[in-house]
Image (tube, grey):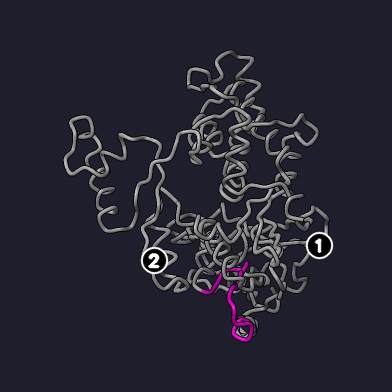
């Protein structure tokens, strides 16, 4: 903070308002859970600020995990380099537009001027709007990919001149996701074993019995099964249901795609969860305990599989084309469907009476088919890889689909 000249010591002006501050301490671990750094961070008590008076914006978009997965798939296919950099104290690089005064931090009060305050020149952790300030500059966790090593080194040198950066070499992890790469076999695997262990410990599930499927087949949950008796309501008050569901969502979005349906079901009942809902969440955690060492694997063939997205097929096509790596994408994206009627509606010119209630969706689908963006192909119900995203499955079928979408045990990569 001293090096970045985050604040200047001043007298608080008349009618001025101060924001409090506090220290946070954290152990930083690697992807195997081994502690390598002890960190202390000074944060502002941003919750004391008033929107519209002390700050204007408090939203900052971040990179989508879909972007990272697509780029990693392309990197695998072309055998590109993939390097990682970190911007030290990233938030402290952004200048503030508003006048913000903060109390002097505990343990560092100036003995000569104990009544002075810190007028912030730059953003600080915890301050509302600090994330939007740094958005204009850059992000703090950086992946650099490409096949020209000299150009990649130039990029690293340029960023090093602009910010205080740390060169982390070949990427071993990003955003808490472990990256395993075997260039001789043209594959990259993404895993979250350390994160899964952390959430299992958080909910006292690290020693629980392991599960074979994330959700029991044919299990139906409804709002009527929420907490109803005084005893059940009291029990659920001591359960961090919403927090557990949120923790699972990070795993679903990044590496364990086959848990998507079970997570989607449990996330619907956060207003009044009951014992049955919590048991279902714990079953998901048991399954993650059993599969924590699995990797989502991208091999040479998976580059083509990137195009096999369904609901976001056109977006994927435009994203990849915009990268400039694939100069032309002549073939339409294959969208697999196990419903003959749906394929017929999409390919016919007229709209049947039964399809009128989703007329707009029919027209949109026909339009992207006509433009050559996508094509519908029939797939047998038993071979539909989308099933883990839409329904509960028995162990044999769930296990088969898990393998087919690219989730493999770590032992198969070594």
Task: Identify the image quadrant of the N terminus.
Answer: bottom right
**For this rendering, which residue is in front, 309 or 224?**
309
- Mark seen at residue 240: none
Q: Residue at x 18, y 44 (%)?
A: 349
**Number of other residues with Cα within 10 Å of mark 1, as a class: few under 14, some 14 to 19, many 20 or more:** few
**For this rendering, which residue is in front, 360 or 240?**
360
Q: Residue at x 45, y 71 (%)?
A: 326
Badge count: 2
Spot occupied by residue 390 in the image (x, y as percentages of width and height):
48, 35
**For this rendering, which residue is in front, 346 or 47?**
346
Residue 18 visible in the picture = no
Write down the residue under mark 1: 37
Spot occupied by residue 83 in the image (x, y as percentages of width and height):
66, 72
User: Label 1 vs label 2: CA separation?
Assistant: 46 Å
**For this rendering, which residue is in front, 57 or 358?**
358
* 180 relative to 270 in the view: left or right: right
Q: Is residue 50 above or below residue 385?
A: below
Disc 2 element: loop
Is 16 within the magenta?
no
Residue 323 visible in the picture = yes
Task: Identify the image quadrant of the C terminus.
Answer: bottom right
Q: Quadrant of residue 120?
A: bottom right
Spot occupied by residue 41 in the image (x, y as percentages of width and height):
72, 62
In this picture, which residue range is highlighted in magenta? 137-152
Write down the residue under mark 2: 329
Looking at the image, tell me whether mark 1 or mark 2 is earlier in sequence order. 1
Disc 1 element: strand
Q: Residue at x 43, y 61 (%)?
A: 56
Q: Is residue 176 above or below residue 323?
A: above
């Amino acid at each position: 903070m001293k090096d970045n000249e985050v604040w200047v010591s001043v007298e608080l002006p008349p009618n001025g308002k101060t924001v409090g501050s506090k220290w946070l301490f954290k152990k930083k671990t690697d992807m195997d859970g081994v502690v390598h750094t002890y960190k202390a961070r000074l944060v502002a008590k941003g919750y004391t600020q008033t929107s519209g008076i002390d700050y204007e914006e408090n939203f900052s978009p971040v990179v989508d995990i879909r972007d990272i997965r697509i780029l990693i798939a392309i990197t695998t296919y072309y055998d590109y380099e993939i390097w990682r950099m970190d911007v030290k104290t990233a938030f402290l690089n952004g200048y503030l537009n508003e006048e913000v005064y903060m109390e002097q931090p505990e343990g560092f009060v100036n003995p000569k001027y104990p009544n002075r305050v810190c007028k912030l020149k730059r953003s600080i952790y915890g301050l509302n709007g600090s994330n939007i300030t740094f958005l204009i500059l850059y992000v703090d966790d950086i992946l650099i990919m490409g096949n020209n090593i000299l150009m990649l080194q130039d990029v690293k040198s340029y960023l090093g001149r602009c910010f205080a950066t740390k060169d982390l070499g070949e990427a071993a992890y990003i955003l808490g996701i472990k990256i395993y790469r075997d260039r001789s076999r043209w594959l990259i695997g993404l895993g979250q074993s350390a994160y899964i262990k952390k959430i299992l410990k958080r909910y006292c599930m690290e020693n629980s019995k392991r599960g074979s499927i994330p959700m029991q087949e044919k299990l139906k949950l409804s709002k009527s099964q929420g907490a109803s008796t005084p005893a059940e309501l009291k029990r659920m008050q001591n359960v961090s249901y919403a927090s557990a569901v949120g923790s699972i969502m990070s795993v679903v979005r990044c590496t364990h795609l086959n848990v998507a349906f079970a997570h989607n079901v449990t996330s619907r009942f956060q207003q009044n969860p009951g014992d049955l809902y919590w048991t279902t969440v714990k079953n998901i955690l048991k399954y993650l305990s059993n599969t924590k060492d699995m990797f989502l694997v991208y091999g040479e063939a998976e580059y083509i599989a990137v195009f096999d997205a369904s609901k976001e097929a056109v977006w994927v096509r435009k994203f990849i084309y915009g990268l400039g790596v694939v100069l032309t994408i002549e073939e339409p994206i294959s969208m697999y469907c196990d419903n003959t009627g749906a394929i017929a509606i999409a390919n016919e010119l007229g709209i049947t009476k039964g399809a009128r209630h989703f007329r707009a969706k029919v027209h949109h689908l026909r339009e992207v088919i006509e433009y050559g963006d996508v094509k519908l192909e029939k797939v047998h119900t038993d071979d539909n890889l989308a099933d883990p995203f839409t329904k509960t499955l028995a162990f044999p079928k769930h296990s088969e689909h898990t393998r087919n979408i690219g989730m493999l045990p770590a032992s198969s990569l070594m």
